[in-house]
Amino acid sequence: MSTAPAIAPDAERLRRRLDAMARIGASAGGGVTRLALTEEDGRARDLLARWLHEIGLEVRMDAVGNLFGIRAGREDAPAVLVGSHLDTVVDGGRLDGSLGVLAALEAAQTLEERGIATRRPLAIVSFTNEEGVRFQPDMMGSLAFAGHLSVEQMRGAAADDGATAGECLQRIGYAGERAPGDLPVHAFLELHIEQGPLLERAGATIGVVEGVQGLSWTEIRLRGEANHAGTTPFDARHDAGLVAAEIVAFARALSRERGPGLRATAGSLRLAPGAVNIIPGEATLTVDLRHPEEASLAAAEEALERFAAERAAREGVAIAMQRLARTFPIRFDPTLVGLVEATAHRLGRTTLRLTSGAGHDAQILAACHPAAMVFVPSRGGRSHCPQEETAPADIAAGAAVLLQVVLQLAEAV
Ligand code: HGY
Ligand code: MN
Ligand code: MN
C-alpha cells in the first residue's frame, strides 16, 4: 500500500520562497536580521502580500499589523488559521517563523491549483513581532489577536531607540484598520522548526508538540558609581558591572541547582560607560527563565529577584527590575495533537511527542482556540543563529503534514 498523499505541497516552490525571504535582512555570515517593524520587516511583508495576492487570496491587515490572506470556504464558517511570523532575532536563522508562514501559503496555493474548495475558509497569517527583540512583550501580534493586549498597549511599546511600535507600523505601511481578532477561528496550526536537538537525537522527522513551557523575561537595571579603576579602593566601590556579572553566574547556578526543567539565560548585558579604566557606573541586563511547570517558574523568578536585590544591596548599587514578558506553560488541544500525530503516521513519518522549549504564537492562540504545532528537526539543534538549518526532505515532510491536517480541519464539521 502506498503511503503517498493524494495531494502534496510543491517542496521546490516552498524552498525558492524560503530563499527569497531569507535574502531580506541577510547578514554577511549567512544569518538574517529582520527585527519587527523595521524596514526589512516591511519588505518581508510586502513580499508575502504580493504572493498572497498572486494566488488570489483576500489580503487583510489588522491594527497591530498582523497580515492575513483569506481563502474563502464553501461555507461562511470559522476559519482554519495557519501561520507563524516573519520577524527574526538579531543575526538569526532563515527558518524560524518564515517556514510556518510560507508553508501555510504553500498549502493554500496547492489547494487553489488543485481546485479543491474546502468547507471552512483557510486563513494564512503572519503575526507581528513574535520574537520580542525590539519591542516587548514577544508574541505581540498574537497576544493582541487573542485579546490579551490592546491596540493602544501594542502601539505604545517603545524600542530602545525611542521609536514606538505604532510609529514604526505607520512608517512601514502596516497599520491596518481592523480590530485584532476580527476573524472567527475554528483552529490554529503552526509549522515550525524544533530549534532544539530532540527530534534529531530520536531520529524522528515530525515533532508532535504537546505544549509549550512558560517564559519569564526580566530586565535588571543597576546604578552604582563610575570611578577610577586605578585609584578607588574596593571598600569604596559601587560596581554595577560586578553585580551584573554575579547575576549572570547565578542564572547558570540556579539552572544547575533546580534540575533540568529550568533554563535560565542572561542574554544581554550592557555596561556604562564601558571603558577599560572606569568602574561600571551602570549595568543593564536581561534574564530569560523558562520552565514547563508554572510553580517552578514562579519559584525561579522569586529566587532571581531575591539574589539580585541582595547582591545589589551588598555593593551599594540601586536596582530596578521590570518584567518584560511572561507566559504560562500551556498544553495544546489533545484532539488536534492526536490529529497531527495520526496524519504524520498516515504519511509514513516517524514522530516524537515533545514540549516546545521556545515560545510561539500558537501558545497564545491556544488560550482561546484549539491549536497545535508541527515541528521538523533542526540540524545540530541550532537556532537563533545563522547556523539554523533543516534538511530539505524534513521541510517537505513538515509541509505535507501541515497541508493534510489543514485539509481535514477545513472539512471538519
Ligand atoms: O522563544 C522565544 O524566545 C521567542 O519569543 N519565540
Ligand atoms: Mn519562531
Ligand atoms: Mn525565534
Image: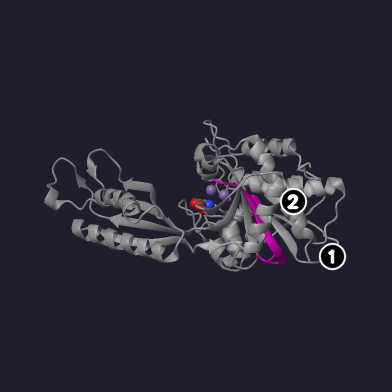
Q: Is residue 179 magenta?
A: yes
Residue at 59% in and 67% down:
367
Picture coordinates of residue 39 (x, y %)?
60, 45
The residue that label 2 is drawn on is 404
Residue at 24% in and 54% down:
224
**The residue tagged with tag 2: helix, strand or loop?**
helix
* Amino acid at dot 1: Glu
Picture coordinates of residue 290 (x, y %)?
44, 56
Q: Is residue 134 left or right of residue 274?
A: right
Image-quadrant location for residue 22: top right
**Residue 63 visible to the viewer:** no
The residue that label 1 is drawn on is 75
Residue at 70% in and 58% down:
81
Residue pushed farthest top?
28
Q: Look at the image and tell me in which quarter the C terminus lies.
A: bottom right
**The residue tagged with tag 1: helix, strand or loop?**
loop
Q: CA distance from mark 1 to mark 2?
A: 20 Å
Q: Residues within 10 Å of mark 2 (few under 14, many from 20)?
A: many
Q: Is residue 17 magenta?
A: no
Residue at 63% in and 44% down:
350
* Amino acid at dot 2: Gln
**Residue 341 visible to the viewer:** yes
Q: Is mark 2 within 8 Å of ligand 2?
A: no
Image: magenta residue range: 172-196
Magenta residues: mostly which secondary structure? loop
Q: Earlier in the sequence, mark 1 or mark 2?
A: 1
